[in-house]
Each structure stands twice: as C-alpha cells, then as structure tokens.
Image (tube, rainbow, N blue to C red):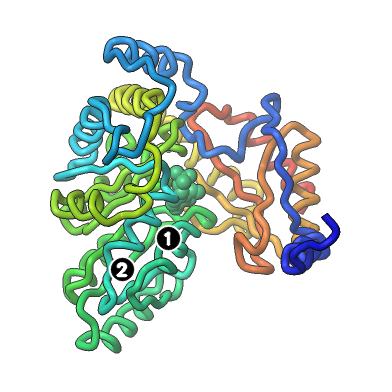
Amino acid sequence: MQNYPSGILKKIDERKRNNSFRNLNDFPDQQIDFSSNDYLGFARSASIFKQASTILENNYLLKNGATGSRLISGNYSLYNTVENQLAKFHQSESCLLFNSGYDANLGLLSSVPQRNDLILFDELSHASIRDGIRLSLAKSQKFQHNNFIDLVEKITKLKGKIENIFVVTESVFSMDGDSPDLKKLAAICEEYNCFLIVDEAHAVGVFGEQGSGLIQQLQLEDKIFARIITFGKAIGAHGAAILGDQKLRHFLTNYARSFIYTTALPPHSLATIYAAYQELETSDSPKKLQQNIIVFKKLQQELDLEKYFIESDSAIQSCVFSGITRVKEISALLAEKGFWVKAILAPTVAKDKERLRFCLHSFTAKEEMEEALSLLKQFV
Ligand SMILES: Cc1ncc(COP(=O)(O)O)c(C=O)c1O
C-alpha cells in the first residue's frame, strides 16, 4: 500500500524511538515464572483440566462455542450453576459473568453512572476502568493514588451539584501491587453517601479465606456497591464477574453493552471456572502463596533491595528503576539466567517509574526466589 495513515506511522516510530515498541513473544516454558498471573498454578493444573472435561460431559455440553450472545442463544445451564457457585463463594446477593475483566469494567462503568453523576477514580486504575469511564456520560475525576484527603476534597467540592458519586479503586493495584486502606475508604463512602466499586482482579486467590479476596478478608461485602472479580489470574481460566445485588444484575443485563453485544463464553471456559473454584475451596495454594510473599519480602530486606521495591503484601512485587533501557537490560540479563521477569514500561506505568514486576506464585521454590534476587542485586 503506497499511501498509509500518517498517524499510524508516526506513532509506531515514536514507540521505536523511545525504545518502548512492543512485540509478541512466546512465553518461554523452560524459564522460571516471575511474570504470569497464574498465582496458584491453576492454569497449568491437570486435575482442573480433567475435572472441567468431566463437567462438560456430565452436562451434555459438548459444544465448541456458545452460538450467540447470552440474550439470544448463548445462555446455557452452566451459566446459572457458575453464577450461583460464585455468588455463594464470594458472599454476594448476585453475580453476573462477563467475557473478561476488561469487558466487565467497560460494561459496568459505561452504563451505571449516568449523566448527572460523578466518578472519582484512583489515578493508577487499570486501563479497563479508565476506558469504561471514557465511555460513560457521567463526569469523572481522578484522585491521587490511595490519597483519601484528596478524595474527600473532591467529594466535598462537588457534592450537592451531583446526583450520585461513584468511587472506583482496586483492592490490589496491578502495577504497584499495593492496596488502599479499604476499611477507611468504605467508611468515607458511607459518610458521604458514595457508591464504592472495587476491582479485585489481583486479590482473588491471594487474600481472604481460601483466596476469596480482600473485601471478604476485611468483611466489607455489604459496604461495596460492586466488586469485579476476574478468572484470568489466580483462577487460571478466563472471564470475569460483577458481584452486587439483584437490581444491579438486572440493570447490567439490560444496559451493559459489553455484556449484551458479544458472543457468550464457550462451555469449556465456564467448566474451567467451575472446576477451578471447586479446587480453590479446599486448596492449600493460597496459603503457600502467602508464605512465598513473606519469604520474598524477607529476602528483599536481607539483600538490601527493599528500597527499590514498592511496599506491597500482594503477589505483585515491583522493583522500580528509572529508564526504559535499564529496565529492559536487567530483564534480559535475568532471562539469560533462566528467570522470566517482565519489564513494565511507560506508557503502561508513568515515565521514570519503569519497573521489573515480579509476580509471585504458590509453586515457586525458596531457592528460586533467592537466586533471582541475588542476581538482581548484582545487576542494580
Ligand atoms: C486490575 C485489573 N482489572 C481488570 C483487568 C482485566 O482483566 P481481564 O484480563 O480478564 O480482561 C486486569 C488485567 O490485567 C487488571 O489487572
């Protein structure tokens, strides 16, 4: 093609000049995994795979695809079974499945807050939250990361001029791995009559009894307007759900466009979610993961690396360096030694806050963590 849209060429060029151009690389199976979100090893569990196949056979669901959207031809009995299972496990009045966490945030935030409403969201919110907000007719403003003084200032300034205020945050931030003080945030939302929305993508499987999430660990279920849980991370499958009350479920079924206008998940996705949650109910993997998080943090201290890491009790431990080239170099050096630690670059994170994001797992040996951090010590 001789002529080409100039914006595309310019933007590609810009990424290449900044050394931040992205390529799709296969995950090298032989490397020690410090980058996947498969925190509990469920994505590679042979017993979950087998159990999912049995569920499909027992339910006569030997179909490759859902055949349509849920409101047309794509709803089948397993949807109801899984939604009930999840509502019970996560102690929620209702549950509605979405095709992904991205779709769940997009559908929720674009449809629920209306024209006269306001959305206040943490400045480090995931792209799916921000994109949902961009599609909403409501006004929106970000507040400083985990800074509730800033949040309250924004609430009080706009209250009275606004019909409803929605406050959006994550229980574990995807790039920093830290958490807001959720008890305090829930109390603020109660005091100022705001509706709190919490994305639990990186908290499920990691915190709470049997990995039920941070909201349940803190017993805040009744204080939250909507929780987003995703299955592509610790659950090792694919898809997501919104937990809330029955009215919210009815509303989303009628108005969330990313729910309505898309083909439903195939039966094997649902069977995998079902089998993974069955496994989670009795699994000791969340406890093993918690132990590994403690070990990893202790090693950071012992090796005097703590100063590079963002304070976090989650499976995401981010080691911040400034400069794309430096982070990429260190990631490549670690890969040469057999450790797969992803370099996270601007614009995914702020410029000069580039980082190596260590994702921890229940199945990682202490020696592997020791070796990875000792190497890191040599390279920084
Ligand atoms: C906080 C957060 N929310 C939502 C998502 C999107 O979830 P999914 O991968 O299921 O689309 C992610 C994924 O990276 C995430 O980190």
Secondary structure beneath dot 1 equals helix
Look at mark 2 in the image and give the residue it sits on.
Answer: 167
Locate residue 164 relative to residue 13 in the image: left or right: left
Residue at 30%, 41% (x, y): give it. Answer: 97
Query: Residue 173: x and y, percent?
Result: 46, 56
Disc 2: CA contacts within 10 A as few (<14), some (14-19) or many (>=20): many
Secondary structure beneath dot 2 equals strand
Name the foreground residue: 81 vs 373. Answer: 81
Work out which quarter of the rendered image holds the N terminus and state it: bottom right
Name the foreground residue: 196 vs 4. Answer: 4
Q: Is mark 1 within 8 Å of ligand 1?
A: yes
Q: Is residue 284 visible?
A: no
Q: Is residue 188 visible?
A: yes
Query: Residue 117: x and y, percent?
Result: 27, 76
On residue 129, which mark appears? 1
**Residue 158 position by quadrant:** bottom left
Residue at 80%, 58% (x, y): give it. Answer: 325
Q: Is residue 351 above or below residue 139?
A: above
